[in-house]
Image (spheres, grey):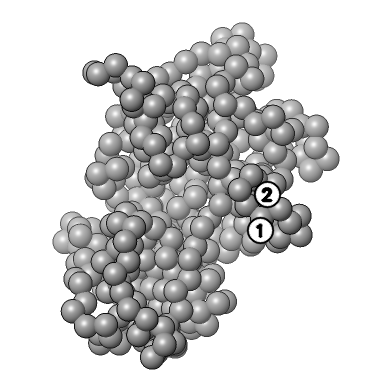
Amino acid sequence: RSLLAAPRLSTPAPPPAAAAARRGLHALVARSRKDVPEGEAASSLVDVAAVSALPRQDPKADVEVEISHSTLNYKDAMIVLGQKGVVRDFPITPGIDYAGVVARSSSPLWREGDAVVLTGNKAGQYFDGGYAERATCRAEWLVAPPPALSLAQTMVVGTAGVTAAMCVDYLQRFGEVQPSHGPVLVTGAAGGLGQVAVALLHARGFEVVASTGRAEALGDHLRALGASDVVGRLQPEPKPLGKQLWAGVVDSVGGATLAAALAQTRYRGAVASPGVAGGGELATSVYPFILRGVRLLGVDQTMPYDLEGYPDDPQRWDGWRAERQRMWALLSESLGDDAIGAVHAGTIGLAQLPEYAPKIIGGEVAGRLLVDVKA
């Protein structure tokens, strides 16, 4: 697909609330794999009379959203397949991202008809998420979409894009990495996060090297997004300190790849670590940190506003919400329609989620899958 031919995604208007009420609300509900008879899917479509009938509602929710779009992330795929690890409990409506318009609000932050976007805050993990025609949440968990992006485009970007923006922002702000310092490596570059990171870094003037196990198949695509070079997977580094190659790294793989990236990062460089696709173990030494001053920056895209298990500090909550708004501004100013269209791998409906979840887990999808909730 040519970048120059990438279409602008439009957002269809949601059906009137009265019509939705007459036919019920469509939603996907996931059950734990261990509770599902052999041969049955862990997730299935249901019709409910109202959003309150979904299995895991947030008692503190004060906004109801008419959802137009969501997306399929790795976490979502795990939950759709009934896998434990990222979900608090089953049954639940998955979907950690969604975009739509406010249908009802008792909060002064939002009025009926406002366009809103949610990423993070454990929607779809602790409480029912975006794989339904309606969802409820706390007002502070929502942000307004950038005026330059349609609601569909915000979900092509989604959590993966917000996380990529945080990685780039952290490299520059906390890692002090600048374009003049040298190339920035993006591992796992074929995935949604990796592709957005390549496009963002290129837009901000960095020389980008993309690393992927599908270098031959996706090399031209990644170069079109802005990579100056495309290489295969990083091989394990035999020494604690390898050749100094990278001024910065966005690593969505983890495991041995992260260890190799740390050993190859230049003096006073930085590595942003948001992912674990290659494993959670990190076998490395302290030498990159104490002899080269390399900074390892953890990136968690959760925006924990008044969320159990996170700091109970309203001032920090407001700071994290402001950060989320800054990330959307960065994405909007750095990514044009062409780049977003190139990252868009395809559009599916709620009924196709059980079919595509294993493909996401298996790394068979390059880019971002948009979920048209009304399809």
- Left or right position of 274 against 25: left
Q: Which amino acid type is shown beneath numbered disc 1?
A: Trp
Name the residue at 55% across, 77% down: 174
Give percent across and percent down for residue 346. 35, 40
Name the residue at 34% across, 58% down: 280
To which quarter of the image does residue 350 belong?
top left
Q: Mark 1 points at which residue?
A: 320
Upstream in sequence: badge 2 or badge 1: 2
* Disc 1: CA contacts within 10 A as few (<14), some (14-19) or many (>=20): some
Give percent across and percent down for residue 259. 30, 72
Note whether 370 is above or below 374 in the view shown.
below
Which residue, as the protein is rendered here, is positioned at the far left?
216
To which quarter of the image does residue 74 belong?
top left
Name the residue at 66% across, 35% down: 137
Between the C-alphas of marks 2 and 1, the distance is 8 Å
Name the residue at 56% across, 13% down: 48
- Left or right position of 155 against 259: right
Would you say residue 151 is visible in this rendering? no
- Left or right position of 193 against 134: left
Q: Which amino acid type is shown beneath numbered disc 2?
A: Tyr
Give percent across and percent down for residue 328. 59, 57
Q: Are marks 2 and 1 in contact (CB under 8 Å)?
A: yes
To which quarter of the image does residue 126 belong?
top right
Comparing 226 with 320, the one in front is: 320
Q: Mark 2 points at which residue?
A: 305
Secondary structure under the numbered disc 1 in the rendered image:
helix
Instruction: Indicate which disc residue 98 carries.
Output: none
